Image (cartoon, rainbow, N blue to C red):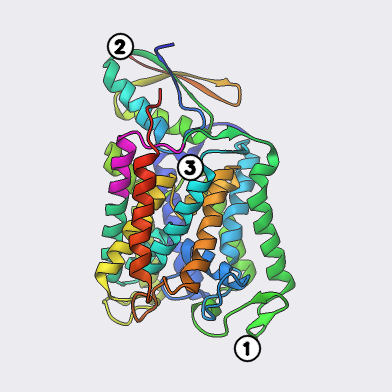
Amino acid sequence: MKNIIDARGLSCPQPVILVTAKMKEMASGEFTILVDTDTAKENVSRAARSNHWVVGSIEPDGDGYRNIVKKD
Amino acid sequence: MKGRNILSLSWGIVGVGAVIGILAPVLQKLGNPGNMGICVACFERDIAGAIGLHRAEVVQYLRPEIMGFVLGSLLAALIFREFRPRGGSAPIIRFVLGVFAMIGALIFLGCPWRALLRLSGGDFNAITGLIGLAFGIFIGTMFLRSGYTLGRSEKSRPATGLVLPLIMLGLLILAIIFPVLEGQPKNGIIFSSIKGPGSMHAPLFISLAVGLGIGFLAQRSRFCTMGAIRDLILFRQVHLFSGILALLIAALIANLVLGQFHPGFMGQPVAHTQHVWNFLGMALAGLAFALAGGCPGRQLFLAGEGDGDAAVFVVGMIVGAGLAHNFGLASSPQGIGPHGMAALVTGFAACLFIGFTMREKLT
């Protein structure tokens, strides 16, 4: 569970703050972030790209999305 | 309809900013007040006046742009399957933030949208307002960095997301049933200004059409004037900022073309020259928007896509407008109101209290 961030239900910009902090903490590797709006999904992807990480996959998950963010 | 959201890409947000930047001066040309083609705060204040929440006779009109923003966003959210009824993330806090966001905006005399439009029309008093806005948002980012959160919203029944759009539809129906009558301060139950900014408006259906169009585009692009500055400070990210820059440049060009660019500090429409209060008013508004997670326009678009918490913020702003005019907190072209300073101190105290107390570690 350590590498899963639950950002569902959080207002802007908290999903991005959480994903940015995780990327900084891990430096490389893979983690999952759960979001419940399309806006948060887009913002997480944008934050990953601008920090030179990639979004491996985005899967629908319940009412939201499960994003896999990674860096080799 | 699902697929790649083109309007959320860099050129999408620039395009939407430019469209708003062109349409606002056009609305002014068609009758809206000076440098106020669109102003979310002012227009919600006019709506508050139209339904009698305050009796400032010069600012009463049911502005169809606001109804269009919410209903256009609802339409986009339904078409693209983004309508998600939700709520329960500290609604009373959001209400209070809405109240003080409005009071701060009315001390400056405009929301962030109008601050940009005032500057594009040559009103240099907007500069201190915009710097104040950025300062207020900067304080907000310090809280966000230290774990500020209003907590999670929960999925809810459709009514949670539909109540504000239905209120807007109701107001629109009232605007059609009780249209403004030339020289009459009231038609049925609806007040309307016979002089002042409230008496100046583009034709109802043009205002509504522009509002619907902007609401639709802004829901898709996530356009947010507060987020633009916040993301720049917090993440060094220019995505949303490129949208407000496009708005400013497009509006400047549109104003030059339409002969509406009048540079200077003095004699600007619906503006005062008290720079300290312009700065502090917008700083309060900026802080409240940052703590609530969106500018006043964005709150309308979020409310349209089902966010009941954003809807509470909107209602807070409308009630805040009533308080601002009933208690002499709002400014006028002569300067700040008799109790504007007291309202500022109270507003900052309330926002700082909320900022310091609503913090937790999220995982």
Identify which residue, B260 or B49, lies in the foreground. B49
The residue tagged 1 is B183
In the image, residue A38 sits, relative to residue B115, either above or below, namely: above
Residues packed near mark 3 inside 10 Å, few (<14), some (14 to 19) or many (20 plus): some
**Precedes in sequence: disc 1 or disc 3:** 3
Q: Which residues are magenta?
A: B137-150
The disc numbered 3 marks a residue on which chain? B
Find out whether residue B148 is within the magenta segment. Answer: yes
Identify which residue, B225 or B144, lies in the foreground. B144
For badge 3, the amino acid type reads Leu
Identify which residue, B56 or B223, lies in the foreground. B56
Element under disc 1: loop
Residues packed near mark 2 inside 10 Å, few (<14), some (14 to 19) or many (20 plus): few
For badge 1, the amino acid type reads Gly
Magenta span: predominant SS is: helix
Rendered location of residue B159, percent (x, y): 70, 43
Image position of A41 (left or right of B48) = left
Q: CA distance from mark 1 to mark 3?
A: 43 Å
**Can you tell which of label 1 and label 2 is closer to the viewer?**
1
* Same-chain status of marks 1 and 3: yes
The image's mark for residue A72 is: 2
Name the residue rendered at 44%, 70% in the picture: B36
